[in-house]
Image: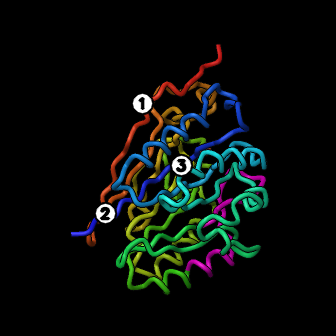
Amino acid sequence: MTTFKLAQFSDTHVVRKNSVLGNGVDSNHALRAAVYNIIRSDDIQSLLISGDLVERGEIYEYFELRNILDPLLGLKPVYLMLGNHDVRDNFLGVFRDYPFIDQANKQWGVQYSVNLTATHALVVLDTLKEGRDAGYLNSDSLIWLDRTLERHRDKNVLLAMHHPMIDVGSSMLNQMNLVNHSDLSAILHKHSNVMRILCGHVHREVTGTFGSIPVQVCPSTAFAYPANLNENNVGDLCRDDPGYVVHEITNDTLSSTLHSLHLHVCQVAV
Ligand SMILES: [Fe+2]
């Protein structure tokens, strides 16, 4: 029996060196601790980070992200994807040489596919629409997805995108989902090989289904949003632990485990 483990981080929101987030959270320290966990875990083969890599999309934030991730280089592949806090050109300016990022282009942005095992592939989509919090897949991205799923028709596909396309229990965040989810649905209906959709954006674990496909939202490594985030509690610092998920593929089964980051990463401003 062969087992393959893919760790998923999300919403790492890295800031400039020696800085913290506006809510007082030391997101850089949190990511460093999470990366150390992955380095120590001999049975975790690779790492996916599902968007909102940095806080403001500044190039100096991407330099710091690179500083934090570079200890993994040569040990385990790191698959990066973009969220609404990212800025595509700044990201590409720093990470062009990372695995598969050289496949990015002007048509579909940062999208690529990876054969994880003989039976499973990871397909990464770019839902960043710069200047907006909600997600969008342009027509080129959707055409690319259609062709890529066809190319992997003999594989079980983990389909990763930052923005969820299901209600996530928050009136505020539901409005920042993938806008054109019906376009995505039309593509997915043509294929039967997507076994799970992996997202971020919500800063909490959420599960659901999109059509018949299970959807899993990974928490943030930096901080959790309150459940039912809305206009009244958006400024509250949630005491729930941040964390990450480890997906385990064994033959044709997939199971996922939530790992809390029991760190005192919050330096709460008073
Ligand atoms: Fe985020």
Residue 16 found in image quarter: top right
Q: Which residue is mark 2?
A: 254
Q: Within the magenta stretch, is there residue 270?
A: no
Q: In terms of depth relative to the viewer, which is nearer, 127 or 38?
A: 38
Q: In terms of depth relative to the viewer, which is nearer, 248 or 148?
A: 248
Some atom of ligand 1 lies within 8 Å of the CB belonging to the residue at label 2: no
Image: 67 above or below 152? above
Image quadrant in which the C terminus is located = top right
The amino acid type found where label 1 is placed reads His
Left of 220 or right of it: where is 91?
A: right
Number of labelled discs?
Answer: 3
Some atom of ligand 1 lies within 8 Å of the CB belonging to the residue at label 3: yes
Where in the figure is residue 157, as x and y percent of width and height?
A: 42, 73
Work out whether mark 1 precedes mark 3 in sequence or the reverse, and give the earlier one.
Answer: 3
Q: Which mark is residue 262?
A: 1
- Report the span colored magenta: 125-145
Q: Which residue is mark 3?
A: 10
Say which residue appears at 58% left-offset and 50% top-offset.
69
Left of 247 or right of it: where is 263?
A: right
- Graded by Cα atoms within 10 Å as few (under 14), some (14 to 19) or many (20 or more), the crowding at tag 2 reads some
- Graded by Cα atoms within 10 Å as few (under 14), some (14 to 19) or many (20 or more), the crowding at tag 3 reads many
